[in-house]
Image (cartoon, rainbow, N blue to C red):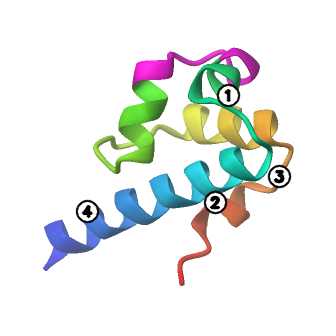
Amino acid sequence: MKGELLLDIKYEFGINVRREREKRGWTIEKLAEKSNLNANHLGSIERGNENVSLDTIFKISLALDIEVMNLFKFD
């Protein structure tokens, strides 16, 4: 159960990052440039394959100019 919950959180977080990126019409490369993160790493985050550090979450939210909590709103 705990492992499944973690997987769902990673997946939902990734969906939110992708949604916010696409809302802006950005490629992964553009988000990578703005967040100073690797594009491959961001792609893995968007697919829900990464445990994301607090530093990375903060960099993504700053690049997207949104509150961190908006990346954790799961429907």
- Give the quadrant of the C terminus: bottom right
Q: Residues within 10 Å of mark 4 (few under 14, many from 20)?
A: some
Amino acid type at image mark 4? Leu
Q: Residues within 10 Å of mark 3 (few under 14, many from 20)?
A: few
Q: In which quarter of the image is residue 67?
A: bottom right
Question: Rounded to the nearest whole Å, what is the CA distance between mark 4 and mark 1?
Answer: 23 Å
Q: Is the magenta stretch mostly helix, strand or loop?
A: helix
Amino acid type at image mark 2? Leu
Question: Rounded to the nearest whole Å, what is the CA distance between mark 3 and mark 4?
Answer: 23 Å
* Labels 3 and 2: the sequence-earlier one: 3
Tell me residue 24's x, y (percent).
Answer: 80, 45
Above or below, 59 relative to 54? above
In the rendered structure, find residue 31 and report the number of the disc placed on it: 1
Q: What element carries label 4?
A: helix
Q: Nearer the viewer, mark 2 or mark 1?
A: 1
Amino acid type at image mark 1? Leu
Q: What element carries label 2?
A: helix
* Labels 4 and 1: the sequence-earlier one: 4
Amino acid type at image mark 3? Ile
Nearer-the-camera pick, 11 or 1: 11
Residue at the front extreme, as displayed: 25
Q: State the residue at coordinates (66%, 15%).
A: 36
Tell me residue 33's x, y (percent).
Answer: 70, 15
Q: Give the range drawn in magenta.
A: 33-40
Q: Is mark 1 on a helix, strand or loop?
A: helix
Tell me residue 20's x, y (percent).
Answer: 70, 53
Q: Mark 4 points at which residue?
A: 7
In the rendered structure, find residue 71 and report the number of the disc placed on it: 2
Question: Rounded to the nearest whole Å, what is the CA distance between mark 3 and mark 2?
Answer: 8 Å
Q: Is mark 3 on a helix, strand or loop?
A: loop
